[in-house]
Image (cartoon, helix red, strand yellow):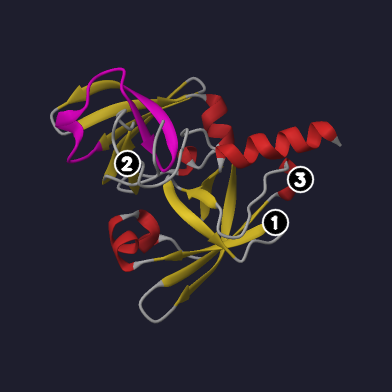
Amino acid sequence: MFTGIIEELGEVTALKKDKDNLHLTIKSNITNELKIDQSVAHNGVCLTVVSIENSEYVVTAIKETLDKTTIGSLKLKDLINLERAMKLGDRLDGHIVQGHVDQTAKCIGVKEENGSWQFTFEYDASLNNITIEKGSITVNGVSLTVVNSKHNRFSVAIIPYTYEHTTFKNLKEGDKVNLEFDVIGKYVKRLNDLRS
């Protein structure tokens, strides 16, 4: 369980294919605090630490993860958003995030405003995920508030701190991102669908 509050940026230092799996080596300032078998969200994707050496650690993405997220498109030296699992008793500063990506989306607009940025994303509505105005959404692991909610698109407003301390500073029109829709909203929608 995560909160969507990014702790650190990590850098991809090695990628190794092994059958249908991809082993990713990540360099980060939090590596010395990690332990093997710990869950860490990588651009919103929960992956398990399988080895640690100095300032680098390795996680493995299986075919299911590679098929449904942007993890497989990472390249050497790419920066990724990192968050360790939340501790019970800590404040929940973002929202409840599982680290289970629902689908990907494409960035279709970046608008610099006076002191902030607005990013607009388009997603495949046939997968039955929804956003609501002022609801929660996780984009590449970052907990955000939805603005301009439409049938298959939405926008988020990014403050300067989030822009500088996450991968939003590198995100451009045409890039794909991982989306995790609000878990409470997903259950409500599912119950509503069952009643229909």
* Residue at mark 3 to residue at mark 2: CA–CA distance: 29 Å
Q: Is residue 71 above or below residue 145?
A: above
Q: Amino acid at mark 1?
A: Asn
* Residue at mark 1 to residue at mark 3: CA–CA distance: 9 Å
Q: Is residue 173 above or below residue 185?
A: below
Could you say which is closer to the camera, residue 45 or residue 64? 45
Q: Amino acid at mark 2?
A: Leu
Q: Amino acid at mark 3?
A: Ser
Residue 102 visible within the image: no
> What's drawn in magenta, residue-wise?
27-49
Left or right of 9, for residue 61:
right
157 part of magenta stretch: no
Q: Position of residue 110 (x, y in %)?
A: 49, 70
Residue pictured at 58% horizontal, 36% vertical: 68
**The C terminus sits in image quarter:** top right
42 part of magenta stretch: yes
Residue pictured at 54% horizontal, 46% vertical: 179
Q: Is residue 77 above or below residue 97?
A: below
**The N terminus sits in image quarter:** top left
Q: Position of residue 90 (x, y in %)?
A: 28, 35
Residue at numbered disc 3: 126
Q: Position of residue 62 (x, y in %)?
A: 49, 24
Q: Secondary structure at mark 3?
A: helix
Residue at numbered disc 2: 82
Residue at numbered disc 1: 152
Q: Earlier in the sequence, mark 3 or mark 2?
A: 2
Residue pictured at 56% horizontal, 37% vertical: 183
Q: Earlier in the sequence, mark 2 or mark 1?
A: 2
Q: Which mark is residue 180?
A: none
* Residue at mark 2 to residue at mark 1: CA–CA distance: 27 Å
Q: Secondary structure at mark 2?
A: strand
